Image (tube, helix red, strand yellow):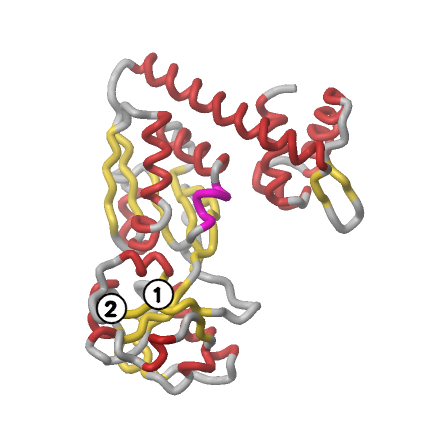
Amino acid sequence: MDINQLRCFMVLSEELHFGRAAQKLEMMPASLSRFIRLLEEELGQRLLNRSTRNVALTPEGAAFLQDAAKVVKAFDELSVRFRGQRQGKKTTLRIGAIDSAARGLLPQLLHRFRDICPEADVHLTEDKTTALIPRLKSGWLDLIFVRPPETLDVHLTSRFITSENCVLAVPADHPLAAKMLVTVSDFLDEPMIVPERRSRPHSHDLTINLFKAAGAAPHISHFAEEKQTILSFVSAGLGLAIVPASYKNMNGDGVSYIALRLDENIKGLPLSAIWLQGNNHLYVNALLALLASEKASLTAAL
């Protein structure tokens, strides 16, 4: 048994699909299957139940997963700590993030990262995806957390993290503000504040597609790009807006946020990590390893 087998088992336990897990690990499904088979043979335990349609953890597999995650985390912490000592100097990690990631994912992620890399000097830049990608390509940033672009530069590597939940932002005195949950049918005739597609394509398309799935088109009263502008317009009664759930943490005076039920065929707003191919930055690798091993708990509230 080695650390690579444990990593493979953890990813497969998350995906519960050999094809998707192999793609995520950048290996052939047959190789992944062999890794898992050898691991089971060595342990003398069946960790997974397999059928032509499903993969599921056995009770033994579920118990083993918990201990495997602890071993991988300890291994990564040990590696980072001793490699950092070998470097003998403080290294700066330059991160870029869109507003929702800066408020939602990164506080907890960086808090845990500090525990394993206390010597790291982290610089955070908050901006839109369209502004952060050029800075990454030019070397001004080491790692960014953004909405995935429609086409990815061949020199960049992307890893999907999660689809962020969305809420409906309404004026505090709006009749809908008393509701705990809404669907698009509750605000079909309301004026909407929508970002321009060229700057925030995912947010723009989410609003359009949500109305389209209901057989309607939104009545767009204003276009706005910056989050504070959008919320100011909502507060002023100029319209409603569909925004990431992390906006609820902002001091939006005069704005109420209501849970939004999306159509089953519509996902939330995608969030991905992107970095330069071949980047062997010590802290980029450490942060990505931490994100992979603790993804479930880090994204549960997003």
Q: Amino acid at mark 2?
A: Leu
**Residue position marked by numbered label 1 in the rendering:** 243
Classify 10 Å Cα crowding around label 2: few (below 14), some (14-19), many (20 and above). Answer: many
Q: Main secondary structure of the magenta part?
A: helix
Rendered location of residue 259, percent (x, y): 42, 67
Q: Quadrant of the N terminus?
A: top right
The magenta segment: 295-300
Circle 2 — which element? helix
The mark tally for this picture is 2
Label 1, secondary structure: give it. strand
Q: Amino acid at mark 1?
A: Val
Q: Nearer the viewer, residue 2 or 275?
A: 2
Residue at (25% x, 49% y) in the render: 126
Q: Residues within 10 Å of mark 1 (few under 14, many from 20)?
A: many
Q: What residue lies at 59% left-to-right and 34% top-to-bottom?
A: 10
Determine if residue 191 is in view: yes
Q: Is residue 290 magenta?
A: no
Which badge, 2 or 1, is on the more N-terminal residue?
Answer: 2
On the image, numbered disc 2 is attached to which residue? Answer: 231
- Residue toward you, 278 or 49: 49
